[in-house]
Amino acid sequence: MNPTDEHTTTVALNGGTEVSAEVLATLAEIGEEVNASLDLDEVLARSAALIKRHIDYEIFGVLMIEGDGSYLRHRFSIGYPRELADNLRIPLGQGITGTAAATGHSVRVSDTSKDARYINAIDSVRSELAVPLMLRGKCVGVLDIQSQRLDYFTRDQQNILTLLASRLAVAIENARLFQKVRTQADTLLLLIEVGRETGAILEVEELLRRAAEQTKRVIDYQILSIMLYDEEQKIFRHRVDVKHGHRVQGKLRATSGDGIVGAAATLKEPVLVPDVTVDPRYLMEK
């Protein structure tokens, strides 16, 4: 993004930043691309490719705020090892990206080895530019690019990415809203179909099996159990168990006061457990 032709046309943006007509065209193209699709993965992949044409980054990432607003997690990445991108959680206010998210301002670091905020996830990184994705005055994520070269990113690139980030934030919000509506529609269709089948299937086992299959359409679970309460024995018994796509025979029995199942029965409401390993109610099947 450093034009060498002295006759290149430039335009002054708000704030006095001058950018080439080529860059403005790219910004317009990115704006069209990110608004052309409601598939978030496609939007982010297109944005990464267009930015790469002008800023030759080695690492690219879009991190979204998750965990009730407490940390950042990668939604899309290029150049990161898969396991690192999947498992990295950056608390707001920590690291370069966490600082950008917490302050709402972009952060440009010329030498990561001399910046105490830098989280050394990849040893070869020397420069980083993190730009918050702001939507209606609130940060929803961070656009982050990194390089193995010292002092690689420029102030002009920082300003231009800030302009892009505002458009990308809107596109992300639109894609999220679309996904939410589509999920709600899928759930409604599932409920209608299950209700229809409930009236047509008289065999309990067949009904529960179909319920498990239909649930998979809207919730990509790895393990599912449907348990029914035995009034005589005062316990919940497994009637349908699916593990990684295969029917299995569950062995666990639970009383109305034991485990996560018992908690849901006692409270008479759903119980959501983000991490069963730290919940003392969880019963490990032996």
Image (cartoon, rainbow, N blue to C red):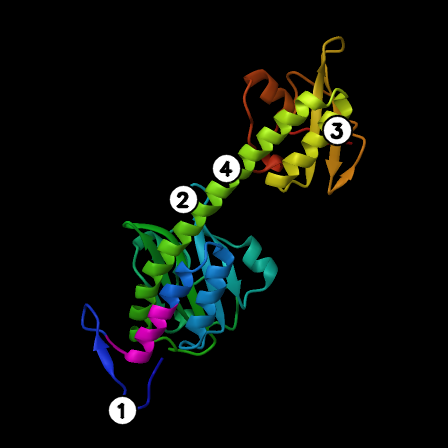
Badge 4 element: helix
In-front residue for pair 211/265: 211
Residue at 70 percent across and 23 percent down: it is 200
Badge 2 element: loop
User: Whole-percent x and y of residue 12?
Assistant: 20, 75
Tag 2 near tag 1, CB within 8 Å: no
Q: Residue furthest top?
A: 232
What residue is shown with label 4? 184
What residue is shown with label 1? 6
Tag 4 near tag 1, CB within 8 Å: no
Sequence order check: which comes first, mark 2 or mark 3? Answer: 2
In-front residue for pair 281/48: 48
User: Residue 253, located in which quarter of the rendered image?
Assistant: top right
Residue at 51 percent across and 73 percent down: it is 124
Counting every numbered tag in the picture gives 4
**Which quadrant is the N terminus positioned in?**
bottom left
User: Whole-percent x and y of residue 147?
Assistant: 45, 74
Sequence order check: which comes first, mark 4 or mark 3? Answer: 4
Q: Which mark is residue 240?
A: 3
Residue at 42 percent across and 71 percent down: it is 51
Asked if one can make out residue 281 in the rendered structure from this viewpoint, the answer is no
